[in-house]
Amino acid sequence: MSTEQNNQTGLVCPNCADGIGSVFYEVPSVPTHSVLLFDESDKAKAFQKGNITLAHCTSCDFIWNTQFDPHLEAYGAGYEATQAYSETFNTFHHKLAQHVIDRFGLKKKRVIEIGCGQGEFLSLLCDLGGNEGLGFDPAYDPSRADVERSTGASFVADFYSDAYQTEQADLFCCKMTLEHIPNTLSFMHGIRRAIGEKQNASLFFMIPNADYILDEKAFWDVYYEHCSYFTPAALRRLLSLAQFDVTDIYPVYDDQYLVAEADIAGEPTVAPSKQEPLSTHRIQSFRNTVAQFRDAWSNRLNAVANKKQKAVLWGGGSKAVSFLTTIETGASIEAAVDINPHKWNTFLPGTGHPVVGPDTLVALNPDLVIVMNPVYTDEIQSTLSERGLSPEVLPITHYMPSEEALAS
């Protein structure tokens, strides 16, 4: 099959432009955005849908949604993705910022952050290191009074693109954004062009860890907005092809995220010297067992409904939307709980479930709280105890199908 024919099928890898993808997971008709705010349940239910068809490149280990359509994306006002209301996350964020400053010697330097959200991380880099920062994000809202932003940071409510290539920096930072980019190699070449002949610039990237998703059979971590999924091998190959010298790639946040640190390289490297093993075995395991994991959760929620019990999800974001639109018994969930007040009294895309604050649970008195991100379990337990509540608290990754189901 020629390259032209492969492009017509959509299976040529957009990460290495060389490998051919093999489809291994499909989810039809899911919301194309998971964290847009809707003030009416019917509007949330009627929000536009798209299809997920994940393919795996056995050349570079990249995973992508072959049916992703960027024209269905609408980043901007009403896109609410901040995690800054969690003390657990803020502690991690502060330590991460200090690490970046120490690692790259960021003292009185200039930082560009691509996909800066509301500017929390860039502000930390500026305040802790006395740096100057420039952040890009189409969802940036300068009117947010609840965000503490550094006076050393400025922001552009736009996508980072070639239009901003004249902006130079000592560090290009990109956190939880590359997974939203469909043409990853083209995107990285754009950053490399912006750096040009500057030889002392560095990169710091953080993205979801595809190996974690595959190992945990975390179908709730697969959603339309995330069109690109990286294993360590895929990330290393991408950065090497874009003429960056990868100095380290490692997992953080209970292995949920991957961090990559890189400097400038003279020439692209087709075969990196530190090639991690491919995730073919993980792909096979995910493909063979993910249906049983979804069925196990459907059965668990059926049992809750049959007992006339009340269940809620803790986390009113993308994981909740993916979970509810993938399993067949989401109607047995009363609501999604979130500590971000901007999400209260809104409704989840796709299913229209209400998003409520923790105080609402006092009247609701749920029997089961399903924690959509296990890293927050202790924080959630404390929040429930402070309100005199003692439901069963079940982290999403701790409920597995039976051995008989997995063997069938």
Image (cartoon, rainbow, N blue to C red):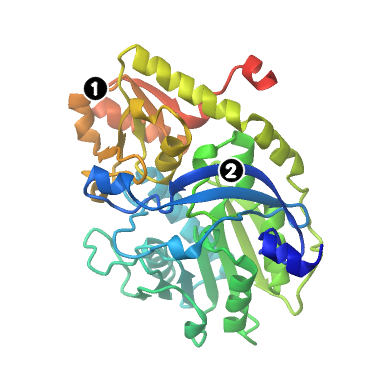
- The structure residue drawn at horizontal position 72% and vertical position 70%, both measured from the top left corner, is 241
- Residue 85, placed above or below residue 126: above
Q: Nearer the viewer, residue 99 or 187?
A: 187
- The structure residue drawn at horizontal position 31% and vertical position 19%, both measured from the top left corner, is 367
User: In this image, 182 relative to 373: left or right?
Assistant: right
Alpha-carbon span between mark 1 and mark 2 = 36 Å
Q: Residues within 10 Å of mark 2 (few under 14, many from 20)?
A: few
Residue type, label 2:
Glu
Residue type, label 1:
Asn
Task: Find residue 160 and report its horizontal and vertical position in percent.
Answer: 47, 75
Indicate the secondary structure of the residue bearing disc 1.
loop
Where residue 365 is drawn, which disc sits there? 1
Task: Find residue 244 and report its horizontal and vertical position in percent.
Answer: 68, 72
Residue that mark 2 sits on: 26
- Residue 352, placed above or below residue 328: below
Closer to the eye: label 1 or 2: 2
Indicate the secondary structure of the residue bearing disc 2.
strand
User: In this image, 192 relative to 48: left or right?
Assistant: right
Asked if residue 169 can be seen in this view, the reply is yes
The answer to whether the residue labelled 1 contacts the one labelled 2, judged by CB atoms less than 8 Å apart, is: no
Q: Quadrant of residue 382?
A: top left
Q: Nearer the viewer, residue 227 or 236?
A: 227
Q: Nearer the viewer, residue 359 or 283?
A: 283
Task: Find residue 132 and report its horizontal and vertical position in percent.
Answer: 41, 77
Give the residue furthest to the top. Answer: 307
Where residue 238 is drawn, which disc sits there? none
Asked if residue 167 can be seen in this view, the reply is no
